[in-house]
Amino acid sequence: MDLPQHVTTIEPLDEQAREAAKTRMNQLTKPPGSLGRLETIAMDLAAMTANPQPAVTPPGIIVFAADHGVTAEGVSAFPQEITAQMAKNFLHKGAAINVLASQIDASFRLVDIGMTQEINHVNITNKRIKAGTANFCETDAMTKKEAVSAVQAGFDVAQMMIENQGIRCLILGEMGIGNTTASSAMIACYSKKDPEHVTGPGTGLSPEKIKHKQHILRKALQERTINSNDSIDVLAKVGGLEIAGITGAMLAAAAHRVPVIVDGFISSTAAVTASNISRRARDYMFIGHQSTEPGHRLAIELLNKQPLLDLHMRLGEGSGAALSFPIIQAAAALICDMAVFDDLKSY
Ligand SMILES: Cc1cc2ncn([C@H]3O[C@H](COP(=O)(O)O)[C@@H](O)[C@H]3O)c2cc1C
Ligand SMILES: O=C(O)c1cccnc1
């Protein structure tokens, strides 16, 4: 089961645009290097967008929602029904991500890519692949065909937002009770580490319950024979529909030279998956923040990137990524709008 070529085709970064941005950066009215990481971010943006004076507004946020059969094993502090309740909360603009979206003037889209409960609402994008994954402790979470369809669905939604709404920076979030368990399983596969190193409290499990979550993960990873070099296999056997959707959206953004802000553990698991599918995808990503979920550190290591913020958050929904957007926006504004030393001669 393969993805079509247009989903995996990503151009290399534009190193000429990076050089031009560097030259301009060194002419701006400030001591060289004084803007620290903002300088690197501005040059990265130039290389991503092929424009020495890059733009990142308007930003767009996509939250993919899906359910996880593995919740039957008691791996989350919250019941599965919360996924649909939170989906309704997103539609009523009451969730953390809605507040943060309005602070940065981002357009927001909620995509049902496989919740158990179907919600009929004009503002929900229906890309339902199936009513939640199967319990991967007992059987594969989904078929490879379903995993590919979910990646394709994510690609299509992101492409539509880029082409029709002119989105210039994409923030990816998720809602799915149980998805830290799926992400832990996937990162254990990719990093070849024991679940002990990737399993955390998620929504707030006690230390004993974390031990139980590790036990479930170990059992699932033993029983599902996973080819960790094949990300579609990893997604299908122990992944999630929203993780697949985010993966596709990240591939679409990179294919359109639109910078991506990766959120916490789940979003980063999708980021690793996207860069395993198409190596250049990671070149178009920033990591918005460091989540306290322990597996996030490993996911970031696999991406070989530094997060922008560390606010001790562990929410998901795209919240940490949305919070870091103003930093990226500032980097773009500084390189575009600051004066160069030559301008001073005319003052
Ligand atoms: C009210 C509420 C709002 C959330 N928003 C994001 N998550 C986060 O927590 C879930 C993952 O944690 P676990 O694997 O432990 O279930 C995901 O839905 C994630 O988006 C939430 C969780 C809850 C309870
Ligand atoms: O880091 C995250 O994205 C995260 C952590 C815990 C629960 N939900 C999401």
Image (spheres, rainbow, N blue to C red):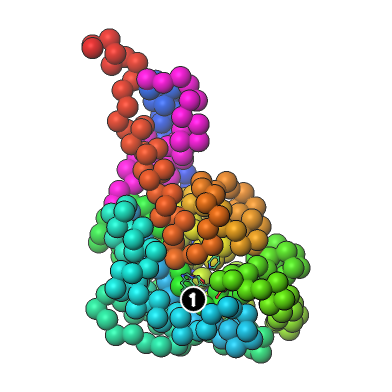
Q: Quadrant of residue 199?
A: bottom right
Is 130 part of what is drawn in magenta?
Answer: no
Q: Tell me residue 19's x, y (percent).
A: 45, 30
- Which residue is located at x 50 percent, y 31 percent? 36
* Of 129 and 179, the residue lying toward us: 179
Q: Residue furthest front?
A: 206
Identified by mark 1, the residue type is: Gly
Q: Tell me residue 245's x, y (percent).
A: 45, 71
Q: Quadrant of residue 254?
A: bottom left
Q: Is residue 261 visible?
A: yes
- Which residue is located at x 40 percent, y 55 percent? 322
Image: magenta residue range: 29-58
Q: Is residue 81 left or right of residue 293?
A: left
Can you say whether 62 is above or below 57 in the image? below
Q: Tell me residue 137's x, y (percent).
A: 67, 85
Is 55 part of what is drawn in magenta?
Answer: yes
- Which residue is located at x 28 percent, y 16 percent? 343
Q: Secondary structure at mark 1?
A: loop
**Residue linked to disc 1:** 176
Quadrant occupied by the C terminus: top left
- Cβ(mark 1) to ligand 1 < 8 Å? yes
Q: Is residue 249 left or right of residue 199?
A: left
* Of 130 and 107, the residue lying toward us: 107
